[in-house]
Amino acid sequence: MGLQVKYNKKYKKWLWRARVRIAGNQEELSGRAASKNEATEVGAIAFTKLMNKKKNEAQALDSNVSLENFMEEWFVTYRENELLDNTTQNRRGFMENHIYPAMGHMPLKDINRLFYQKFINSLAKKDTNGKPKLASGSIKILNSIVNACMEYACYDLRIIDYNPCIKIKIPQTKTVFEIQQDELNKFYSETEILTLMADNEELDIIYEAIHIFTNTGIRLGEFIGLLEDAYFQEDKYLLIDKQLKSKSTKKNPIFGAPKTMLSSRIVYLDDETDAIIRKRIQKNKEFRFAHPEFKQKYNFIFNTHGYPLLQNYVRSCLARICKRTNIPYHTNHPIHAFRHTHVKRLDEAGLTETAIQQRIGHTKGSKITRAYTHMDEALNLQTIDIYSSYKKAKDF
């Protein structure tokens, strides 16, 4: 999708290719030019031509189109390329397992608010074992998919009169006690952290990982994707601008963009965390010096014999530590719970919501808050100073 311009050494020409998905099929135009500017200009004209064709096709749609056909076209065109692979797979699961079977055959015009609310309510009904078909959080995600699709049909294409997803109530599938327990399971207590760190049966690098998670709030993919050039020793910070995808292998690491736009950030380090990273990089240099025959494209900060750590390996190590120390292993978010622990620490240290969001790359909060996040370098430096003082006072 979109316009691509690249130089071809064989033909000694600039090649352009414009691709657009129209009515479920991919259409493209391509050509050559003597210069990059010419290729870009001609390609842009071709891309505009295809987009106009797509617009005309869309305008030809009417409200009798089925939800499944319309949603497929909308999702492939406007959503799929923006999402990470795991997120795309997750969203498709909601569409294919729940949305399409229930109402995919229905014309858009026949989906009204009453019918849609009943559909949402049905997802929260409990079976004989007392378990709902979907949890409240999953129902919210499903609703966001349908809502975005209907918004496009209503306000962009104007083929339906109103969006039936507006003012829909998401039923709560958990009791108050279950919600409280779930909140407790989202982070590790300080006693649990100390107990985990006291275990010594895994590689040192795993305990270093637990320390990094707890004291920086970075995500698992961001951690295992850290390269040595992402560490700035003089100013003691990490540059988070990529993550290692879950489908990576030791010999085929696959990088991707951070989870969200706000996830690209600078994370300043307290002295103890900075020392761990410096020591790890020094060990890496010693390993490369001792094994000059070992050639690796990327210098990962945290690695085993030059190869990157993988997500499943880190999770399995943590599961074993939890079993040995009798600490509950948070099945749904075992690594993410460390991130929540760091947020809890920052909150207890008295840091503002904006400061916390800036440090962990979170998107929660108002539009105004998000507008100022990542802009205040002084606030970012102040955050690590306050956090370091908090650590010393708490002695951990």
Image (spheres, rainbow, N blue to C red):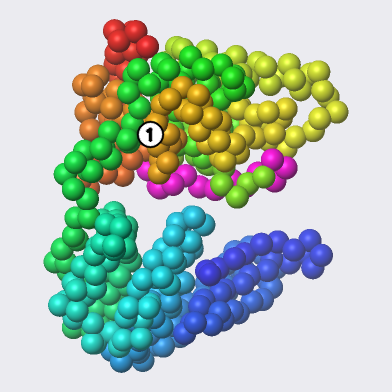
Asked if residue 231 shows in the view, the reply is no
Chief secondary structure of the magenta span? loop
Quadrant hosting residue 106? bottom left
Please name the residue that numbered disc 1 is placed on. 337
Which residue is more in the foreground, 108 or 317?
317
Q: Is 261 covered by the magenta stretch?
A: yes
| Residue 317 counted in the magenta span | no
Q: Residue at x 56, y 81 (%)?
A: 27
| Residue 88: image location, x then y, percent | 47, 61
Tell me the amino acid under the disc marked 1. Answer: Ala
Quarter of the rendering containing residue 183 = top left
Residue 45 appears left or right of 280: left
36 above or below 66? Answer: above
How far across and how far down the image is residue 99, in percent? 35, 73
* Residue 200 appears left or right of 271: right
Q: Quadrant of the C terminus?
A: top left
Per the image, label 1 sits on a secondary structure element best described as: helix
Q: Residue at x 32, y 80 (%)?
A: 103
Residue located farthest toward the front when viewing the structure as drawn: 128
Question: Vertically, is 176 above or below 321?
Answer: below
- In this view, the residue farthest toward the right is 293
What segment is highlighted magenta in the picture? Answer: 250-262
Camera-side residue of 94 and 375: 94
Residue 354's image quarter?
Answer: top left
Badge 1 density bin: few <14, some 14–19, many ≥20, Cα 10 Å: many
- Residue 378 in the image: above or below residue 179: above
Q: Is residue 64 above or below residue 357?
A: below
Q: Position of residue 387 (x, y in %)?
A: 32, 17
Q: Residue at x 20, y 45 (%)?
A: 366
Which residue is more in the foreground, 112 or 50? Answer: 112
Do we see residue 183 in this rendering?
Answer: yes
